[in-house]
Structure formats: structure tokens, C-alpha cells
Amino acid sequence: MATLLSMYGYDNDDDFVESGPVSGPTHKPQTIAALDVRQSILEDIALKTLYLSGSLSVLELSNRTQLSYEVANELFCKLRAELLCQVTGMTGTVPQIAITSQGRSRAVDLLAQSHYSGAAPVSFESYAEQTRKQSVKKVEVHAAHVKRAFSHLVIENEMLRQLGTALNSGSSVFLYGPPGTGKTTVAEGLSRVLADDEVWIPYAVEVDGQIITIYDPSIHKRVPESEPKNHDSRWVLCHRPAVLVGGELTAEMLDLQFNPTTKFYVAPAQMKANNGVLIIDDFGRQRIRPDELLNRWVVPLDRRIDFLTLAGGKKIEVPFEMLIVFASNMDPAELVDPAFLRRIQTKIRIGEVSDDNFNEIFCRVAAQNQVPFDIGIPNDLIDFIHVTLKQELRSCYPRDIVNQVCWAAQYEGRKPYLDRSALKQAVEAYFLAKS
């Protein structure tokens, strides 16, 4: 069975395969008619932006709404004709504008319905079309890509083959095995294989007049240097995203998040993970039961569509275009029934490591942390785990023991050094004592 040996560190950002963005919104619309959302939606956002910002120029309005100058000027002319804003001056040939009292009253009414302002949304249809064009199923992964992305790990070729196969499926992976064997590290490595590929993410989408925000800077890593100069700025070019959720996951988090104060929606985790990787860590320990979660995703895993519900009860069909990684310490057969297990296309057990590979991990971790050690210390640790504890070797042990040595040295005000005395202190602190 394949096994993982991990240094639990990553500092090789140059090891990804180079790729370019998929075709997308490379042309910025120059008129309201050329946009994919209704004029009234754009006018409302422009007015709310003007109300919240105070006086600004048409150019600043363009930048804040991520619309072209021509569209922003067209919106300004519409608002001005309705006496909702007025010109207060000129900066060269660019009008400086401010909201009128009539416009202020209208903006207050609009804000009572929704506080959303700023970047104009794209239509839901445009979002769905672009997301399907960028599906992870359309990414080809080869051995060299996987080896580069996992170069920070000591990992067997057989497992690399299994992981590469799983990535090419673009579907779902179940990583299972005992604690401390590196399942989360492997899951994150899978996302790194895809990370350098670039996809378009919208700031927000509009559905029946409702706004759903999608772009999240904490998840979506923008690559502005790769964006075409005249692209539709309502879209952001990002690395394929990776979203990790753990025990905090609830059923409510899988649906649209409506904020009763701001009165607009935030996309759920799986929607933010579209075109990337969604990692369900510690699967089986969520606040939502495993069977409930999996029943919720029977259709998405089969048909690659999800159904989300707006506050009024209307359901919308959303693309479900991501690689899902389930990572668990539990036996998959005890967590889910055979019918659902069949839908998870690839199952990979991550178990114990060999003595030689454990030794290699130990040496790498010690070097990474600048901890010199006596010859034979790795073998002493191996003997202690095998003989005294009668346990299997796990890839987390070298990191955790070296950390113990570093913490003790910091407390004593000296440089860390791993001899038999330091090893004894570390294992006594880390492992449970036998009764």
C-alpha cells in the first residue's frame, strides 16, 4: 500500500507547471447594452456607490464599479437626467459628480433593500458558462506536474501515480488512514498541482435582482500581471482556488449565506471552490452528519450541478465543477454506504512509513529546523516507537519530536541539539506514558 512521508513544510514555489488562463472575459463592454445585466441593476449600484462615497469623478465611479469609463459616463448621464446626481466641477474633461437630495432619498430606499455597492455583478448565466469552460475535468495532469508539486514531500512513486490519476478524474478522492500520516498535507498538495492554472472569478453574480458575492481575497489568489489590459474588470484572474473546511462545517454552510443586515448573499464554500479543489478535512467529525452531507451531494457528484436556495424559496442550478477531497482518520466503509462510496471515484490509503523513509524524513526535518543531532538518533527513535510503544511509524513524528527539542532549547536559552538526553525528554513530553 502506498505511504506518505512528509516534511510538513513547503518552500518551492517555482515547481509548478506553467500555464495560461482559459479563454474568458477579455473584452471590456463599452455600452450598457453590451453588458449582461439589466440597466436598472447598474444604475442602483452606481447610485449607492455615489451615496456612500460622497463626491467623486466619473473616472472614480468607473474604477469602483469595475465598469468601463464609457459605461460609467452613460450611467452618470442617466442618473443626472433623473435629477439623482449633479456635476460639481471638472477635472480636465472628467466631470466631478455628487448625489442630489432626491438621489440621496432614492439611495436610502435602495440600501434598505440591499447594501451591495461597488463592483458590478455579472449575470448568473455568464458565470455558469465560464465556470463550465474552466472545469477541473478539462485539466490534463502528467507525472512531471505531480512530482514538482509534491517535491517538498518524501513520497512513493506509486502514490504519486494514484494522486495523478485522481487529479485527471476531476471528480472526488477519499484519503484515509490513521492520524498523523499526512492526509491533509496530501490534500493540499493536490490543490498545488492545479494552483498555477489560471481561471476567471467574478466579484459577484446577479440572480433575479439578488446579488451573490463570490470573489474572496482570502481564497482567490489574484494574478493581475496575467490579466489582459482591456478585460472585463468585473472578473478577476486567479489561480485555481483551494477551500478547506473541517469540523466547523454545518448543513447551513452549504447553502447561500444571506446576511440580514447587508441583505445580499455570500457564496457557500463549494461555490467559492468552483474550478479548484474543495477539501473536507477530518471527514466524519463535522457538525453535519456524514450521511447528511453525502446525501446532499449525491446529485452534484453525479451530474456536476448543485441546487442552492434563495431567501424566497427559489432554487437555482449552480455548476459543481471542482475536485472534492475527503480526508478522514475513520474507515470509509463505516462512514458511508457502498452506493455512495462508489461515487467517490478514487480511494487512497495513507499509512505507516518504512524505517529508511522515516530516517530520511527525520534528517530533512532536522536540517530544515537547523537542529544538529547525534548519529543514531533517528534509529533510536524508530526503536522506541516499534519496540517500546509497539506502534507503526507515522510521518508526523519527526516534525513533532524536533519541535519538542526546539521548544525546550528556547526555554533554556540555548541552541537546539538532539542527543539521547534531548530525545528522551522529547518522547516523554510527546507520547502517552504506558500505564
Image (cartoon, rainbow, N blue to C red):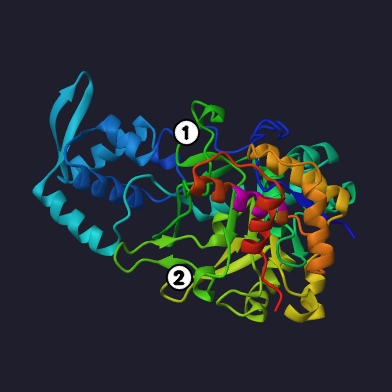
Q: Nearer the viewer, mark 1 or mark 2?
A: 2
Coordinates of residue 424 in the picture (x, y in percent): 68, 57
The answer to which of 333 and 416 lies nearer the viewer is 416
Task: Tell me the residue at 25%/38% (across/down).
Answer: 76
Query: Residue at the location (85% across, 52% down)?
Result: 159
Q: Is 143 located above or below residue 287 in the figure?
A: above
Q: Which mark is residue 28?
A: 1
Left or right of 49? Residue 312 is: right
Q: Main secondary structure of the magenta part?
A: helix
Secondary element at tag 1: loop
> In which quadrant will I find the C terminus?
bottom right
**Dot 2 surroundings within 10 Å: few (below 14), some, or many (20 or more)?**
some
Residue 161 visible in the current orientation: no
The numbered dot on residue 234 is none
Instruction: Classify 405 as above or below 289.
Output: above
Of 108 and 203, nearer the camera is 203
Q: Position of residue 143 (x, y in %)?
A: 85, 40
SS type, badge 2:
loop
Task: Pick the residue in front: 298 or 66.
Answer: 298
Magenta stretch containing residue 401, yes or no?
yes
Whether residue 391 is in magenta: the answer is no
Separation (CA) of disc 1 from disc 2: 30 Å
Mark 2 residue type: Leu
Residue range of the region highlighted in magenta in the rendering: 398-405
Count numbered badges in the picture.
2
Label 2 belongs to which residue? Answer: 310
Q: Which residue is most to the front? A: 421
Residue 56 visible, this angle: yes
Crowding at dot 1, Cα within 10 Å, few <14 / some 14-19 / many 20+, comes out as some
Residue type at mark 1 is Lys
